[in-house]
Image (cartoon, coloured by chain):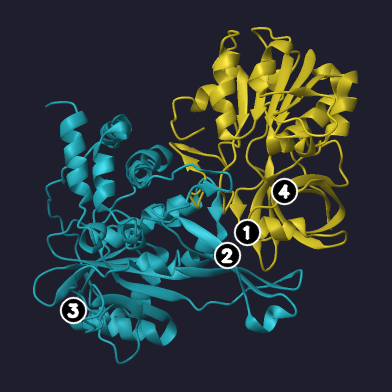
Chain colours: A cyan, B yellow
Amino acid sequence: MKLTNFRSQEGMIYTISEDGVRHLARRLGEKYDVYGPVNTHDDAVFSKFQFKKIEPSDKIELHYPLTNLPPTKYFFRARETVLEFKGSKETGSDDKKTKSVIFGLSLFDLKAMNKLDKVFGEPIQDELFKKNRDNAYLISISEDYDPKPELGYDLHFRKSGENSYLVWVGSKNGQKIVDANSSLFTKTKNVKKKYKPSKKHSHSDRAKIIARAKNDPIWDKLAETCFGCGICSYVCPMCYCFETQDVVKVEGITKCEGCRERHWDSCMNADFAAISSHDFRDKLRDRIYNWYHHKFVRMPEEYGFSGCVGCKRCITYCPAKINFRETLDFLEAKYGVKK
Amino acid sequence: MSCNTCDYKLKEATVIKTEKLCRDIISLRIKIDKGSLKFIPGQFIMLSIFGYGEVPVGITTTPDIKDYFEVAVRSVGTVTRAINRLKEKDKVGIRGPYGNGYDIKEMHGKDVVVVAGGLGMAPLRSLIEYAGNHKKVFKSFQILYGAKNPDEVLYDHELFACDNFARTILTVDEKKGYWGGETGLITKHINKLRITPDMRVIMCGPPIMYKFIIPEIEKFGIPDEHIQILLERRMKCGVGKCQHCTFGDKYVCIDGPVFKYSDIKDNLEAI
């Protein structure tokens, strides 16, 4: 990954005021499409805070609870054109995109972005994802008690006292942003602050536990409560199942014209693993198991990290009030090695 | 994999011949407009018709033929029904080939038996044609193929003509009209094969077939790693992203579609 190779020069840490942060967002908006969290004041949705394109009239939220959809939606999009066609010819879909800035990612979402980079990049690079990703800068933000993220950001702002932020530069692009807006940034010395390392679960232990629990009655019990609606996948910054579909324009009825779209899917949906003659996961219990299995067994095996960043969106938005952590705790108690 | 990026773009190709193999299965001979398709038997392609969509299909011809390749598609859904309506000179889109084909190296100098059920014959035909062209590669070659009824026996003329290099046993579940082959499920005819413990068994068929045939084969002392199985799954990307074809820790599209039985036997969802 391109971001891992960059090392900011020793001591190159800056401070910026809270007003400065907002001012930077406005300035970047003159040059790029800036997306950030805003309060929509809309009671009809689960969370009033959502990532959207920032217009001059919008106020970016610097302290916000998680948005209901993660900003990863700008890279792995809910709907995206794969190709366009007219008759039997594939026509180009080379839409020139303006560079964009995702402003104010939470640490959860930044972590998810780093993981998705790898998921879509290995072993085969997905070009659709890459095209969106190459066009974007990531600016993350965190509170003063949060540890500094290790990588993946172009710029990272961490709250530091009243109305001020510490700024880490994570890439050449980040440095360019700083240099182009140098009046907003003040150089400062490296600040060292020790954080207690958070308790870490070993992937392999958890993977073993879940593999062992394949036939546990808990999956049947969950299937009784679960609606199989798939919202846990749609709000998850790490879920990336997709379906493709050809969409034909109305004018295209006489001469087939339209596009092939890929859109979000969920492994919780019925027929997800069905072929004409057989459904390999016709029971909801098996689809629920697959969701856990993918996140905590298959992904650690494939990529070396789990398919969860701990944002708890799936818990917050589950209409059946299922909490995957309770399931994991239950399984760990039942199948884990006694300490 | 020949490339390690995927942009889902298609190669233009033309249908140069169609043949109804039975009531609801069509065989298409396809020529890529620019260039040719390099593949090994057992690999699959994504076949597109604009306005309908894209499906994974196995290649049914030997890679020795460079000018064209063939696929066989059963009419069951929106896309496959549209494929079954294709005519000569119609345009299609192609991506691939994808996945891992049969491990032919592993069969060198060995007794080989091919076990097919129904449309499972389609991707195996690629291997059978290959064997016909490279007789010296295998010590012996046998084919056991079961279909529902004589109408649904695919490539029957070709298979009957295989006797210059292969022993062929064709069987149908229900006899109907004229039928020169056997009747009954394929498990009934295993004893007619010449089975040696060191032989290689290559299979493709519906999941139910594996359930019954594998225990029968294991009785002869053939180890699980000498059994190769081609699995069918729903697929949308073909490159290990969309998650539709996964089972356990495996992807059918990039780890398969051909698996050693020993690699998948402990996986309850595999077959």
The residue shown at (28%, 41%) is A219
Query: Do badges 1 and 3 share one subunit?
Result: no
Q: Secondary structure at mark 2?
A: strand
Q: Amino acid at mark 1?
A: Tyr
Residue B28 located left or right of residue A217: right
* Disc 1: host chain: B
Spatial CA distance of label 2 from label 1 is 13 Å
The residue under label 1 is: B8
The mark closer to the camera, 1 or 3, is: 1
Asked whether the residues under the numbered discs 2 and 3 touch, taking CB atoms below 8 Å apart as contact, a structural biologist would say no
Instruction: Name the N-terminal-most of marks 2 and 3.
Output: 3
* Disc 3: host chain: A
Q: Amino acid at mark 3?
A: Ser
Query: Do badges 4 and 1 share one subunit?
Result: yes
Q: x, y percentage for residue A159?
A: 16, 69
The mark closer to the camera, 2 or 3, is: 2
* Disc 4: host chain: B
Quadrant occupied by the C terminus of chain A: top left
Within 10 Å of disc 2 (Cα), the crowding (few <14, some 14-19, many 20+) is some
Q: Quadrant of residue B113?
A: top right
Q: Secondary structure at mark 4?
A: strand
Does residue A235 lie above or below B163 as drawn? below
The residue under label 2 is: A245
Spatial CA distance of label 4 from label 3 is 64 Å
Along the line of sight, the residue nearer the viewer: A318 or B157: B157
Query: Do badges 2 and 4 share one subunit?
Result: no
The residue under label 4 is: B73
Q: Residue furthest left?
A: A162
Query: Do badges 2 and 3 share one subunit?
Result: yes
The residue shown at (79%, 12%) is B139
Residue B17 located left or right of residue A105: right
The mark closer to the camera, 2 or 1, is: 2
